[in-house]
Amino acid sequence: MSDTHSHTSNNIAYVADQSLPELPAPINTRGPIAWVRQNLFSTWRDSILTIVFGYLIVVAVMKLAPWLLFNATWDANSLRECREINTGACFAVVNRRLNQLLFGFYPSHLYWRPILTFFLMFVAFAPMLHDNLPRKLLWFTAAFPLLAYWLIWGGPVWSIVLVVAALVWGYFVFRFVSSLANQTAAIFAGIAAVLLWFLIAHDDAVQLFVSVFGSVGLEPVESAKLGGFLLTFVVGVTGIVGSLPLGILLALGRQSDMPVVKMICVGFIEFIRGVPLITLLFVASVLLNYFLPPGTTFDIILRVLIMVTLFASAYMAEVIRGGLAALPRGQYEAADALGMNYSLSTRFIILPQALKISIPGIVNTFIGLFKDTTLVSIIGLLDPIGIMQPIRSDQNWNGIIWELPIFAGLVFFVFCFTMSRYSMYFERKLDTGHRN
């Protein structure tokens, strides 16, 4: 009997003793044909919609492509020459006025300064966008706003040195108040100290240093000469970089247990969200000087930067507040159980999760802000939209209608689409959940 059992066990295998080779996916589930079948013709409704919209796209391309590409003129000295060469779009205006579209009326011999600033911006953002870079680069990230301001506007180097001194002064005020009161109150006290420095003592201190040590620095450039996409990037990047930390502070202040801080944050958010951006820009350009001390000079672009940053920070605060509200109560209780105070729990547990949840809303606010920079043309600043009128006023290009907006729209699309795609990449990278 044992021989029969042994013979049977040797011939019948219930468990595989080796891994089976992987089989390729079925041919009808991979490749472009499978993708088209699954995404465009999976049901009869999808098939009808695909055919209808495909037909509309083909018709639009056939109508626009000859004018936009095949019959377009890229090199001419005037609109009349374009019409003599071909009947399509006259993109020669973009070719001839490219520097003006990019830099406005910035001095041509100083183009190297905004170009250098543009490339240094990516170096400054790199350690925040990629976690595999050395953390020491964050020191350059922190110093970049001052370096960018100095490169674009120029002027004596003492203005930058005194800005650093003002930030150090604000830090010491923050440390002093944090030893006496809540962390949120200390942050607002530090910000208030820095703002008072700039409103009261900064200009006089710069003049004193110039008189004592001399005017050492770069050739100054007036704000009126900034224009084109240079102005767009100055306003957009400043608003994006400034609105995120300020929005975080406002969101935390709105949830604070301190009645005064909460009341100020709620009032600020609701007021800003209830007023159109163009109204704030008019306030910045026309009315703000009436509320300043007599003789105070407040640069128009600086006023616009402040208003745009404040406007975006109010919307950013609501986006981040939504992320804070989405966290389960157990996260707060777990932080309390670990013995963490408010500062530690917010920094290491609450805020990272809230920001992760809020990534789509944050990037959406960034994209909206970047596009809203075109509103500055209404108050006389020559951004890409505003600078089109002086170009059209030239008799050589009088009659240009579509070519300049198409170029500007294409540039805006490239940068907004890039931000959107990076947002999707960042979401996938931080996704720790399991999806079916």
Image (spheres, rainbow, N blue to C red):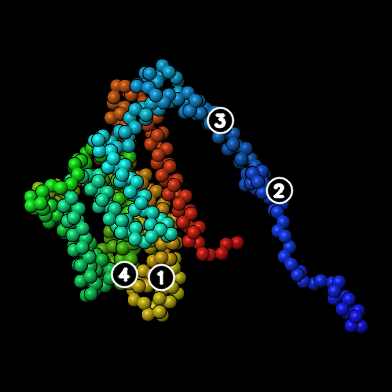
Give the mark nearer the N terminus: 1 vs 4: 4
Q: Secondary structure at mark 1?
A: helix
Question: Relative to 41, does residue 184 appear above or below in the rendering?
Answer: below
Asked if the residue at tag 2 contacts the one at tag 4, i.e. Cβ–Cβ closer than 8 Å, the answer is no
Residue 173: x and y in percent read 20, 67
**Numbered mark located on residue 28 in the image:** 2
The residue located at (42%, 60%) in the rendering is 131
Quarter holding the N terminus is: bottom right
Label 4: which residue?
256
- Does residue 240 appear left or right of residue 12 in this picture? left
Amino acid type for the residue under numbered disc 3: Val
Give the mark nearer the N terminus: 4 vs 2: 2
- Mark 4 or 2, which is nearer the eye? 2
- Mark 3 or 2, which is nearer the eye? 2
Residue 20: x and y in percent read 73, 62
The residue located at (34%, 53%) in the rendering is 124
- Does residue 363 appear left or right of residue 24 in this picture? left
- Does residue 198 appear left or right of residue 248 in this picture? left
Amino acid type for the residue under numbered disc 4: Ser
- Please identify the quarter of the rendering in which residue 232 is found: top left
Label 3: which residue?
59
Asked if the residue at tag 4 contacts the one at tag 1, i.e. Cβ–Cβ closer than 8 Å, the answer is no
The residue located at (40%, 29%) in the rendering is 403
Give the mark nearer the N terminus: 2 vs 1: 2
Viewer can see residue 283: no
Mark 1 to mark 3 CA distance (whole Å): 54 Å
Question: Relative to 179, does residue 40 appear above or below in the rendering?
Answer: above
Give the mark nearer the N terminus: 1 vs 3: 3
Mark 4 to mark 2 CA distance (whole Å): 57 Å
Q: Secondary structure at mark 3?
A: helix
